[in-house]
Image: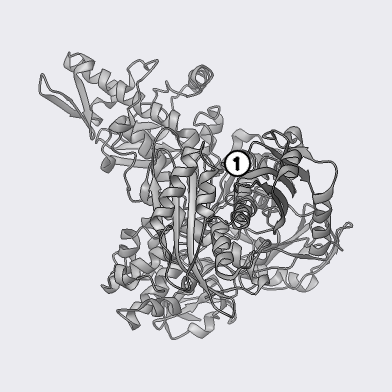
């Protein structure tokens, strides 16, 4: 540890008062530890540090797992600062420092496509404040009026006197300036870094093997662990016989964890895992050992008819009366299965426990979640936990809600000699069978059509487990888990008479946030049912949607752009069929159109996918494009093959041979439509997927006349060509 | 046993059936090669053995004795290999975890077929990418090959 003269008490006071006052922590004008030791650079505020050589270090608080915001969030700061992007260096916020400084950097958790949406205001303020302080310093030094000073691309200048300076020479003076109480943020028309497709800063280390993920940590004296958890959720460990395993080469220790897992520690991971396979384990399934997918489906079926359900807040009019008056009434039930996240990097964590501190290295979407997991597991003070930042090998929600793998690693470390770093790595089988799964859900929709082909009355019954309640222990507001009903709480279609409700249907299967969450499944029902209504009305599905969207300009806008891109109003080539869908997830507006053909054997050839998004403001268009491309792959994998099934209380799928993902040969041609109409900040990572699934299934209906109301498609005789 | 990795000979004391992946990662600290599935399904562990792409999670270290092993670390000293450069130019990686394997597979494909067709790419590039970067992988390979992605990716009815 370096000696530092920083007055922690004062620092904390300043930050606390600033945080309370404005929700944004400014005023930290003391050099950081690192800078004291190095180059004499200065913190202008907690987000911006400037070195004498003009290097601008912008802090990044959230995580990077391929979603790109480690680049796009600092773009926002740099823009208001009028920095030269070539001189910008991006550095993770230290998690321990963040906790000790009263969470000065705001949220670190990287979920729900929130990083830009929920940080942009304080990031813009941080950049603008730092800029104002640089300008004030220049004004003082040059004896000119601050209002006459320009900042452009990292150069501060005064036209009248001809003076100019880089940021570095003025950094010390800027850090000593009073923090302005208010700053004026730029008009979006003046943005020149926001909106640029800058290359992602985390890409170069991903092409030469130097990127460090959680599983790549190597420390002196490190030992390695593999774990087997009770295959039945809720089950416990009865006994185990490790006599064979103990004598295997390299085995250091064999232990039970949390009463429901067995772990082997060895001098490398392969030896640990090999020994683990030789342990005979007896489990107690605690009453869950007979549960199968069929049982779960029966429970959900019953939920569709259950008399007691919680009302959605957007109910209006009299749906039953409207249905009674309708010319024709349609009813359909839809089903979406449990799904696993299966990021390419399996779960794992490295933990080292010393008397005065606990260190953890783990791929995560929730650095503070790692800390609280260790506080709970070990009873240590959060100030003494040091969570180190690494790239995550995919997250998709698996590493955000629960840090269960960190707990296991900590409990293993606690049974080893003090100071021994242990790296726990799960097998792919553990990863697949011990996930927090996308909830299984059933939907019953009912709607009427009047004689003009307008929707007259709409009813929805949603049966789903609750992520919020089961995983997070959050009480449900009004009995509804809002993550399960996304997509129904604000229909973009103007239907005066609506009645929708939610029937909580818990199971023993752990639930979690799976990329796009409720929006990954509700549009499968909603946007196909709209198609069913269009067909019943004898109308074109695109124009049928449009006519019901008169009051929803943004939904209409993105759907029109996508329809134009695919040439909706001109007939496709012979044998090719189209589907379209629209959604409004995570503050953005997305639409998709798919062109495909299906042969007599049910092999689907996807010819083209058009993905459209309107994010309002858009920070890094190339990254948005990448996210949309990936979301398409994600959605089509789920549509074709995705399902987690249960027999005898345990997950049957185990690895990529039976949890199939899309490969290169199946990759469709994707075109993206990027819209930034301004006025709002929408999310990016999650929304892209939402409209793909229903657009794809609507196209399958157009091609085959088969309306697929349950997933995956492999059970309906379809394959992907 | 003796293993020749990235033009350097390493003497390692490991079991004959220890997969090459774990020798690379845990014994020799070459962390660029990744563990994804352990059953040759995903390709995150792809390295070259005598120029051929192999899935090192299921390749016994003993089988590599006397052969030339190349990992992502041995592709270039400064990320200057044309495939690595194309990966950056096309902004291929998202999380990046599978990309060492993707790159090693692509390098091998291009060595055999300097101007691969889409069909060649489909046949060779069987590595999984959960982030879904396949489009950009394809574009980057075509770029290295000097193919025109616009024409090779023509919309086929």
Tell me the residue at 56%/46% (across/down): A365
> Residue A603 appears at what percent x and percent y?
56, 76
Q: Residue furthest front?
A: A451
Which residue position is annotated with label 1?
Answer: A491
Snapshot colouring: one colour
> Residue B91 appears at what percent x and percent y?
36, 57
> Residue B39 appears at what percent x and percent y?
60, 75
Q: Is residue A512 above or below residue A706?
A: above
Tell me if A493 is positioned left or right of A499 in this view: left
In this rendering, does residue A40 appear at all?
A: no
Q: Is residue A565 above or below residue B42?
A: above
> Residue A688 appears at what percent x and percent y?
50, 51
Host chain of mark 1: A
Tell me the residue at 26%/43% (across/down): A86
In this rendering, does residue A47 appear at all?
A: yes
Tell me if A298 is positioned left or right of B106 in this view: right
**Residue sitting nearer the eye, A53 or A459:** A459
Mark 1 Cα-neighbour bin, 10 Å: few <14, some 14–19, many ≥20: some
Tell me if A555 is positioned left or right of A465 in this view: left
Tell me if A520 is positioned left or right of A62 in this view: right
**Residue sitting nearer the eye, B142 or A356:** B142
Helix, strand or loop under label 1: loop
**Residue sitting nearer the eye, A492 or A474:** A492
Q: Quadrant of residue A298?
A: bottom right
């Amino acid at each position: 540890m370096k000696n530092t003269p920083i007055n922690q008490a004062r620092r904390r006071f300043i930050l606390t008062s600033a945080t309370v006052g404005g929700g944004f922590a400014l005023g930290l004008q003391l050099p950081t530890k690192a800078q004291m030791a190095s180059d004499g650079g200065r913190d202008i505020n907690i987000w911006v540090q400037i070195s004498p050589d003009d290097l601008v270090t912008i802090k990044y608080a959230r995580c990077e797992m391929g979603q790109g915001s480690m680049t796009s969030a600092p773009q926002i700061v740099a823009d208001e600062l009028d920095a030269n992007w070539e001189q910008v260096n991006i550095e993770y916020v230290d998690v321990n420092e963040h906790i000790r400084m009263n969470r000065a950097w705001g949220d670190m958790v990287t979920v729900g496509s929130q990083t830009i949406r929920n940080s942009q205001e304080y990031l813009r303020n941080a950049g603008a404040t730092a800029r104002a302080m640089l300008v004030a310093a220049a004004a003082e030094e040059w004896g000119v009026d601050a209002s006459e000073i320009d900042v452009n691309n990292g150069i501060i200048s005064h036209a009248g006197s001809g003076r100019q300076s880089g940021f570095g020479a003025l950094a010390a003076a800027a850090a000593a300036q009073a923090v302005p109480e208010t700053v004026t943020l730029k008009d979006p028309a003046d943005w020149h870094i926001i909106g640029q497709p800058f290359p992602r800063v985390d890409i170069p280390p991903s092409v030469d093997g130097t990127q460090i993920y959680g599983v790549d940590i190597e420390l002196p004296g490190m030992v390695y662990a593999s774990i087997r958890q009770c295959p039945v959720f809720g089950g416990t460990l009865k006994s185990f016989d490790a006599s064979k395993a103990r004598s295997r080469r390299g085995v250091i220790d064999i232990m039970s964890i949390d009463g429901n897992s067995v772990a082997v520690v060895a001098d490398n991971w392969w030896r640990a895992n090999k020994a683990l396979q030789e342990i005979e384990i007896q489990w107690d399934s605690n009453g869950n050992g007979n549960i199968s997918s069929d049982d779960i489906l029966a429970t959900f079926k019953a939920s569709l008819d259950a008399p007691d359900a919680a009302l959605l807040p957007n109910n209006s009019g009299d749906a039953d009366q409207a249905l009674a008056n309708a010319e024709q009434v349609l009813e359909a039930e839809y089903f979406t299965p449990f799904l696993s996240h299966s990021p390419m990097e399996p779960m794992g964590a490295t933990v080292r426990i010393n008397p005065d501190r606990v260190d953890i290295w783990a791929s995560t979407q929730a650095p503070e979640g790692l800390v609280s997991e260790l506080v709970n597991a070990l009873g240590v003070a959060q100030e003494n936990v040091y969570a180190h930042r690494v790239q995550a090998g995919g997250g998709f929600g698996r590493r955000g809600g629960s840090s269960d793998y960190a707990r296991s690693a900590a409990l293993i470390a606690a049974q080893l000699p003090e100071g021994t770093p242990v790296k726990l790595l799960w097998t792919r089988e553990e990863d697949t069978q011990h996930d927090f799964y996308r909830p299984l859900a059933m939907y019953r929709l009912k709607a009427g059509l009047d004689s003009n082909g307008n929707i007259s009355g709409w009813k929805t019954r949603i049966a789903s487990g609750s992520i919020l309640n089961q995983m997070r222990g959050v009480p449900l507001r009004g009995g509804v888990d809002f993550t399960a009903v996304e997509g129904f709480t604000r229909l973009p279609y103007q239907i005066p008479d609506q009645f929708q409700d939610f029937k909580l249907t818990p199971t023993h299967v752990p639930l979690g946030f799976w990329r796009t969450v409720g929006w990954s499944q509700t549009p499968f029902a909603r946007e196909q049912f709209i198609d069913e209504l269009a067909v019943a009305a004898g109308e074109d599905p695109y124009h049928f949607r449009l006519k019901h969207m008169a009051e929803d300009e943004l939904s209409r806008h993105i759907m029109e752009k996508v329809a134009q891109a695919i040439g909706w109003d001109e007939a496709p080539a012979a044998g090719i069929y189209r589907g379209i869908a629209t959604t409004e997830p995570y503050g953005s507006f997305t639409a998709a159109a798919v062109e495909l053909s299906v042969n007599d054997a049910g092999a689907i050839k996807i010819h083209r996918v058009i993905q459209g998004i309107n994010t309002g403001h858009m920070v890094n268009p190339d990254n948005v494009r990448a996210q949309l491309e990936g979301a398409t792959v994600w959605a089509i994998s789920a549509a074709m093959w995705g399902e987690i099934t249960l027999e005898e209380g345990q997950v049957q799928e185990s690895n990529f041979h039976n949890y199939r993902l899309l490969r290169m040969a199946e990759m469709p041609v994707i075109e993206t439509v990027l819209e930034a109409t301004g006025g709002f900040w929408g999310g990016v990572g999650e929304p892209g997927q939402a409209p793909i699934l229903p657009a794809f299934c609507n196209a399958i209906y157009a091609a085959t006349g088969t309306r697929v109301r349950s997933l995956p498609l492999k059970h309906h005789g379809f394959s992907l060509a | 046993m003796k293993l020749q990795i990235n033009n350097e000979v390493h003497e390692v004391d490991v079991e004959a059936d220890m997969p090459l992946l774990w020798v690379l990662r845990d014994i020799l600290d070459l962390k660029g090669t990744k563990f994804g599935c352990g059953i040759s399904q995903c390709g995150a562990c792809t390295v070259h053995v005598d120029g051929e792409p192999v899935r090192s999670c299921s390749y016994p270290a003993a089988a590599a004795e006397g052969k030339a092993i190349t990992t992502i670390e041995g592709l270039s000293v400064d990320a200057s290999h044309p495939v690595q450069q194309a990966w950056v130019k096309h902004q291929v990686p998202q999380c990046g975890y599978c990309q060492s394997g993707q790159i090693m597979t692509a390098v091998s494909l291009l060595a055999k077929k300097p101007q691969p067709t889409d069909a060649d790419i489909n046949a060779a590039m069987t590595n999984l990418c959960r982030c879904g970067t396949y489009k950009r992988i394809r574009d980057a390979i075509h770029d290295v090959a000097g193919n025109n992605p616009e024409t090779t990716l023509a919309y086929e009815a």
